[in-house]
Amino acid sequence: MASASNDQELLPDQTEGFKVGEKKTMDEYNKLDADDEAMQRYKQSLGLGGAGKDLSDPNDPRHCIILSLTMDSEGRPPVTIDLAEKGSEKTLKEKPFKIKEGVKFSMTAKFKVQHEILSGLHYVQIVKRKGIRVSKDQEMIGSYAPNSDQTPVYSKRFAEEDAPSGMLARGHYTAVSTFVDDDKKRHLEFEWAFDIAKDW
């Protein structure tokens, strides 16, 4: 896990002047503007108060469960980091995967939300080489209502990136990734590794 000195850098950058809204329960959201038909349709499009059975597990207190992170790139099958089982992330650092230098790739996160609305989920990643930070990447994933049988899993594809290239870029990298919401609650944090190579 990240040390205390890394705690701040694993939070998303703050937008100046932005304030997180007041936290509300699902019931409070459902009662808001109950007589406004347009607002009701909008809330249903967000998964609030719509049809569908809530899939929240009463025996699992987690609000956001990250199921997987997948890297897609032309020229190779997708590489998926399975995060569905509690503790599955603990061995990722010892199993680096290979990325071909200079290729375009994108990441996709699959996750579930339960019990309450998840506000402002972000993915933040710090990449280091030989102990020196080489990048901080972050992606706004969004806000989500608890999953229902109509939408059992959410999926978010991140912006396309270019892998570094050239002899100096080749080598072993380590990364710390975290999924954190507007309330700065970390839903998952894990370390992993990859190698930039001349070929797959």
Image (tube, rainbow, N blue to C red):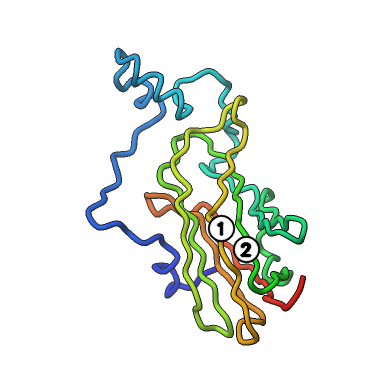
Q: Position of residue 130 (x, y in %)?
A: 58, 85
Q: Residue 102 lies in what quarter of the image?
A: bottom right
Image position of 180 with respect to 97: above or below: above
Q: Quadrant of residue 128?
A: bottom right
User: Tag 1, which secondary structure?
Assistant: loop
Task: Give the crowd class for mark 1: few <14, some 14-19, many >=20 residues within 10 Å.
Answer: few
In which quadrant is the C terminus drawn? Answer: bottom right
Going by the numbered disc 2, the residue's amino acid type is Lys
Mark 2 in CB contact with mark 1 (< 8 angstroms) = yes
Of helix, strand and loop, which one carries label 2?
Answer: strand
Tell me if mark 2 has few (under 14), some (14-19) or many (20+) residues whose alpha carbon lies within 10 angstroms of its own.
Answer: some
Residue for point 60% across, 57% down: 106
Residue 34 marker: none
Q: What amino acid is at disc 1?
A: Glu
Q: Residue under circle 2?
A: 104
Q: Earlier in the sequence, mark 2 or mark 1?
A: 2
Res 160 label: 1
